[in-house]
Image (spheres, helix red, strand yellow):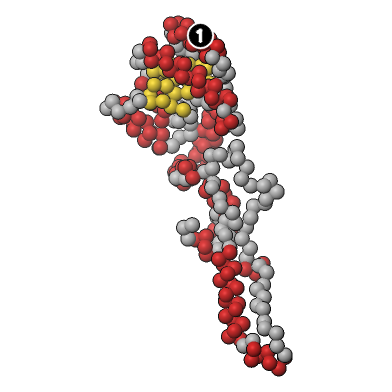
Amino acid sequence: MNIPHELDDLKEEIKAHAIDCGLDFFDVVFELCTYDQINQIASLGGFPTRYPHWRFGMDYEKIGKSYTWGLSKIYEMVINNDPCYAYLMTSNPLVDQKLVMAHVYAHSDFFKNNAFFSHTSRKAIDEMANHGARVRAHAERFGHENVEDFLDCCLSIENLIDIHSMGIRRRGEARAKTRFLEQSEEEPLEVRRIKAKDYMDRFINPQEFIAAKRKELEDARAKQKRFPPEPERDVLLFLLEYAPWSPGSARSWPSSARRPTTSRRSG
């Protein structure tokens, strides 16, 4: 913690007030940063270290220009972690620092006790650092461009994952990964024939009639098919379960499947 004694004393005073108000929070570690350091951390989603990707540099440029042109200012950032890390900007006046500190303790109480965050990792900073090390190792092994292309694909659908999947069970545990059966594995269609004597069957049930009935059943079966069998909110999970990973493992997809069917406070 690199805050001066004045802010350290203020922190203890605000912490006591927060406890008196009934708040229950993680230990809070405050870090004093320049506006440029704040922008760098903000571009990484509030975490001090992440995996390497061009998007973070793009976000840094956007945040930095917005601050330079007076369009926005980050007053505080706080991370859902145990201990809880919060960043204060050096240029903030003392009254702003007081408000930010009180605000951070309320955030930490919310992180610790709200049901939405109960399933999240409390060691997020360590996990982010581990993820970054793993991505860098993959980049050294498989090539930086290959890893970056893969990350681009994943990040293109990052807003299409199910963010509530940790707290809401949408599937039964017994449900196995469902695959569409090949046509040969499906139950054969049975056309109901009109009862008739053997010598009259070819007149009462002509081939054209049987073929038309079979076509109706096939169309009805095609309409009843769903792909996926149940609506899937998590697009990334859908791709993990159904998308072919390599040409040699490509699966047979039904034709219907080929058709489209942290806290940061700124001013």
**Where does residue 223 sit, x and y in percent of width and height?**
55, 66
Q: In this view, does 54 lie above or below 219?
A: above
Residue at 49 percent of width and 11 percent of height: 14
Q: Which amino acid does label 1 sit on?
A: Glu
The reply, left or right, for residue 23 in relation to residue 86 is: right
**Along the line of sight, which residue is nearer the eye, 179 or 96?**
96
**Where does residue 11 sit, x and y in percent of width and height?**
48, 10
**Where does residue 21 sit, x and y in percent of width and height?**
54, 14
The reply, left or right, for residue 11 in relation to residue 203 is: left
Q: What element carries label 1?
A: helix
Can you identify the residue that label 1 sits on?
12
Q: Hey, which residue is sitting farthest left in the picture?
A: 69
| Quadrant that contains the C terminus | top left
Residue at 56 percent of width and 47 percent of height: 237
Is residue 146 visible in the rendered image? The answer is: no
Quadrant hosting residue 19 = top right
Quadrant hosting residue 189 = bottom right
Q: In this view, does 212 lie above or below 180?
A: below
**Along the line of sight, which residue is nearer the eye, 130 or 81?**
81
Residue at 67 percent of width and 50 percent of height: 175
**Along the line of sight, which residue is nearer the eye, 216 or 80?**
216
